[in-house]
Amino acid sequence: MNFSRILVMASNVFQEVIRDRILYIIGFYTLILAAAIRILPEIAASSENKIFLDFGIVLMSVIALIVAVFIGTGLVNKEIEKRTILVLIAKPISRSEFITGKYFGLSAVLAVLITIMTVIYLGFLQVAHVPHGTASILIAIVFLFLQISLINALAISFGSFTSSLLAVILTFAVYLMGNISQDLLKFGRLSRNPGIEHLTQALYLILPDLSRLDLKNHAVYGLQALPSPTAMMANAGYGLLYSSMLLAIAILIFSRREF
């Protein structure tokens, strides 16, 4: 693969998504936080600080998830529907470079989006004098980006061989199941049914364990509540490896498609 061609493809995706007014989402995020910081003291007088800490990160993750799923699943299909894919693959760009460029382009958009929302979130915490651990929040945000990048790879993988609507449904389904994969494994062990236990073990091995990349709850309680550095490095490596595997699958599937 040629890195310069991947960079050009990623740059085109980045500019295209930004032109689609995706950054208006930042205004929505700001308005919701502003409303929350005014309303929460009235409905949760004793715990509004903790609720706002949770709410800001959860809202950020929901917005990033929606962007990753709805844009990621359509990145490939949009080119096919417009027939521009015929022009792109006729040029000196391989299909692997095409998929990789799409992934990195959307990942760059998500990185910018999450970074700006993080700055706004920390600004609200500062202005409202909400006690918080900045370091623990930033670590949780880094892991949020790793989780959303994995979902981005998943969305592109599904979008490379099926319709955008079905890809959206499948991606959300895997996201939901990936967040409870450890619970599924525990349920299989508690059932004491060999069939159910084997099924839950298989699902756990196949599905991404997204809970390993979810540090939202830990961030609220500061650095002491975070997993050990070794565990966090292992979990970050898991997320990167799983994303790479999904990207490889997407490339393999797309390389076999006929247009």
Image (tube, rainbow, N blue to C red):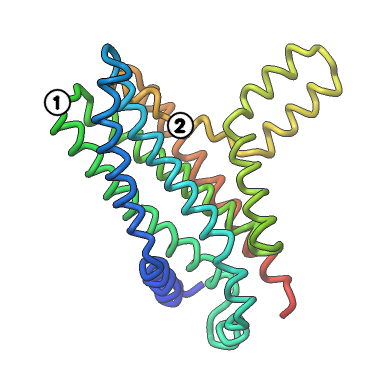
Tag 1 secondary structure: loop
| Position of residue 14 in the picture relative to residue 202 (left or right) | left
Q: Is residue 22 above or below residue 89?
A: above
Residue at 52% in and 47% down:
150
C-alpha gap between disc 2 and disc 1: 25 Å
Residue at 43% in and 48% down:
64
Disc 2 marks which residue?
Answer: 214
Disc 1 marks which amino acid?
Answer: His
Quadrant assignment, res 124: top left
Residue at 14% in and 26% down:
129
Tag 2 secondary structure: loop
Q: Position of residue 41 (x, y in %)?
A: 25, 21
Q: How many numbered discs, if any?
A: 2
| Position of residue 19 in the picture relative to residue 90 (left or right) | left
Q: Position of residue 161 (x, y in %)?
A: 70, 63
Q: Is residue 204 above or below residue 42?
A: below
Name the quadrant of the C terminus.
bottom right
| Position of residue 1 in the picture relative to residue 29 (left or right) | right
